[in-house]
């Protein structure tokens, strides 16, 4: 009877340890929360203006063109877009985050930034 209890306890420890390991590995592989923002749009009260994700996927700087209503000509608006991680979001703006993906991963508690690939 004592052998049966000991076996049960050791399997409980093993299963518990595997759960902790699984949680650690899962957190290393997940991306931190991110928003695509215009770096040139920072306001002290609101933070950075959130722009469409497509602006960040094509590179660090992208442009969008449209018609200028007053002159009838075309205009180009340049957006200095970048991923902004772990920020507070309110009314289309993001603040109190970081542009560093590895720093955002480190904030999550496991410090897995050295083991993964670069941000993107």
Image (cartoon, rainbow, N blue to C red):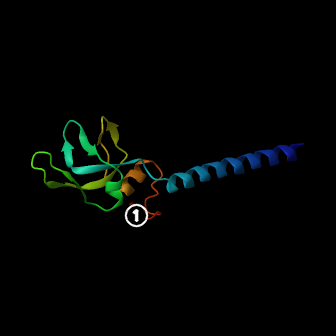
Which residue is found at the position 13% from the left and 54% from the top? Answer: 73
Q: Nearer the viewer, residue 119 or 24?
A: 119
- Residue 68: x, y in percent? 15, 49
Q: Quadrant of residue 1?
A: top right
Is residue 17 shown left or right of residue 84?
right
Q: Which residue is mark 1?
A: 118
Which residue is found at the position 18% from the left and 39% from the top? Answer: 44
Q: Residues within 10 Å of mark 1 (few under 14, many from 20)?
A: few
Which residue is found at the position 13% from the left and 50% from the top? Answer: 72
- Residue 114: x, y in percent? 43, 63
- Residue 99: x, y in percent? 31, 53
Q: Residue furthest left?
A: 71
Q: Residue furthest front?
A: 72
Q: Nearer the viewer, residue 12 or 89?
A: 89
Q: Residue furthest right?
A: 1
Assign a secondary structure to mark 1.
loop
Which residue is found at the position 33% from the left and 61% from the top? Answer: 58
Is residue 81 shown left or right of residue 44?
right
Q: Quadrant of residue 69?
A: top left
């Amino acid at each position: 009877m004592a052998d049966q209890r000991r076996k049960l306890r050791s399997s409980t420890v093993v299963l518990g340890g595997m759960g902790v390991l699984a949680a650690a590995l899962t957190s290393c592989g997940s991306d931190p929360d991110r928003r695509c923002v215009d770096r040139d749009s920072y306001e002290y009260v609101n933070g950075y203006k959130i722009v469409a994700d497509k602006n960040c996927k094509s590179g660090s700087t992208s442009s969008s063109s449209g018609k200028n209503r007053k002159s009838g000509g075309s205009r180009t608006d340049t957006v200095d877009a970048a991923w902004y991680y772990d920020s507070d979001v309110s009314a289309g703006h993001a603040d109190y985050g970081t542009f560093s993906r590895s720093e955002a991963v480190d904030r999550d508690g496991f410090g897995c930034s050295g083991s993964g690939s670069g941000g993107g």
